[in-house]
Image (cartoon, coloured by chain):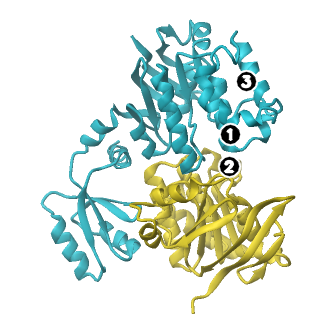
Chain colours: A yellow, B cyan
Amino acid sequence: MEEKVIVCRELTKRFGDFYAVNKISFDVNKGEIFGFLGANGAGKTTAMRILCGLSHPTSGEATVAGFNVYKQTEAIKKNIGYMSQKFSLYENLTILENIEFFGGVYGVPAAEIKERSDNLVRKLGLTAEAKKLVGALPLGWKQKLAFSVAIFHQPRIVFLDEPTGGVDPVTRRQFWDMIYEAAASGITIFVTTHYMDEAEYCNRITIMVDGKVEALDSPANLKARFDADNMDEVFYRLARGAKRSGD
Amino acid sequence: MSAVVLDHITKTYDDGKVVAVDDVSLQVAEGELFGLIGPDGAGKTSLFRILTTLLLPDKGSATVRGYDCVKDFKAIRSRIGYMPGKFSLYQDLTVKENLDFFATLFGSSIEENYDLIRDIYEQIKPFNDRRAGKLSGGMKQKLALCCALIHKPEVLFLDEPTTGVDVVSRKEFWAMLKSLKQQGITIVVSTPYMDEAMRCERIALIQGGKIMSVDTPDNIIAQFPVTLYAIKADDIYRLLTALRNEPAIDSSYAFGEYIHITLRNGSDIDTLRQQMEEKGHAHVAAKAIRPGIEDSFIRLMNQA
């Protein structure tokens, strides 16, 4: 049986009489690339915040890396990585300083940080820039570096919130190479995107509409079920009936 | 007369260390729906800010409806509508108050040009008394468009109106632009989404401050110089890795469920498919396809 890294059962988050997340259930397997799609306001961000241990659900059950989302949020945070479109490294620290800082926060031993950060910088082709401030890097490089930092402590799962927004088409694909490589090394990928071609790169996809999971399957099965040529069409069919709109 | 002219415009920041716009020239015709297509940092916003008289170029000249962007800034400001990439209405004024404010600022009223905004405004009218800061992303975008239109501009500048917006709202937004165009307004719109390029009459592909190509989307696609193939197999990532080490391959990029490839001279697709099957890739399928704008963009980027 495949190892489950995220287990989610009827997870619900209510604000007053508004159900931001309404009884969602799904499992994510180890090493899987799991796409989490939905229209603006569908409840993606709220669900992701619960799974990252940043928000308590109203009801339902969920475990992330085996830890309970009600009681073990600190353990969850130690076992996950997180990266969003909004760049979150320190612009006025160098590349090496950022790696050292975040590695330290996540408890990677100093000797290991030293050794692995040199390898990482070499692999990214940033040896010449290693001692330069991160703020001076082009956007595409920043996003690749931010991803590398998010998985530097070798988390069980990494949450990526629209990681490729606004990035040029070549860098966007290099970024997905890094995602594939991380998944192959056993890190589970939980990713949101507005690019429907990227939805195709996922092993499985959920599409959220108005707080509920309306579809959960592989891209090929979803296309077959909706008799659609591409994911854009699948998404459009599901999401156009949405009652809610938001950020 | 062209509605918008950029003539050898250059803009640098940080004492010339950062070149945001590098010797850009282009023209937008009257009544055209023109797209600036490129990623973040390509120079799109700098161009918009020069054309809307908010930023001075280092070199070159620009005109909007024949008025110079430096000397005639007042004449331009009353004739254009501008929707910046960042939401910039008053967050603590209501929907109605924002609209009234912008109409008054331009010596007009909501009633005077109601026809122009009717279809868009009626979608947000039920929230007339809600503060702009409390609106959802999609509603903010509609209100911002109404405010940019309320004085009946001759030219509309929209900087990344659909960024971060989902597929459904993006389709609605482009339908709105089409109907505005039918009312004779010239529209210059930027987007990082390559698929939206097809909705413009002409586009400029822009990267690193330079224009790589300006033409109709169909012509840009027709200029793709070689045959493009789409290939797939059961394990797409394994196939992509294998193709990269294949001497017959000139370029290979993942595109949804397929990989788009071009071949070197003297190679053919059937031989390649056989080779991949012999190497253990299951269900290899390949076909010649028509390139998209994103294929053209990548090819031009790699030539630069």
Mark 1 or mark 3: whose residue is earlier in sequence: 3
When asked about the image quadrant of residue A120, the answer is bottom right
Which residue appears at 58% of the width and 24% of the height?
B49
The image's mark for residue B139 is 1
In whole angstroms, how far apart are the C-alphas of marks 1 and 3? 13 Å
When asked about the image quadrant of residue A97, the answer is bottom right
Residue that carries the numbered disc 2 in the rendered image: A245
Disc 3: CA contacts within 10 A as few (<14), some (14-19) or many (>=20): many
Residue that carries the numbered disc 3 in the rendered image: B99
Total numbered badges shown on the rendered structure: 3
Residue A57 on image: x %, y % = 81, 70
* B239 is higher (above) or lower (below) than A37: below
Q: Chain of mark 3?
A: B
Which residue appears at 70% of the width and 9% of the height?
B107
Residue kind at label 1, given as amino acid type = Met
Which residue appears at 65% of the width and 37% of the height?
B141
In whole angstroms, how far apart are the C-alphas of marks 2 and 3? 21 Å
| Badge 1 element | helix
Q: Are marks 1 and 3 on the same chain?
A: yes
* B129 is higher (above) or lower (below) than A159: above
Disc 2: CA contacts within 10 A as few (<14), some (14-19) or many (>=20): some
Instruction: Please tell me which residue lies in front, A209 or A145.
Output: A209
Residue B144 on image: x %, y % = 66, 31
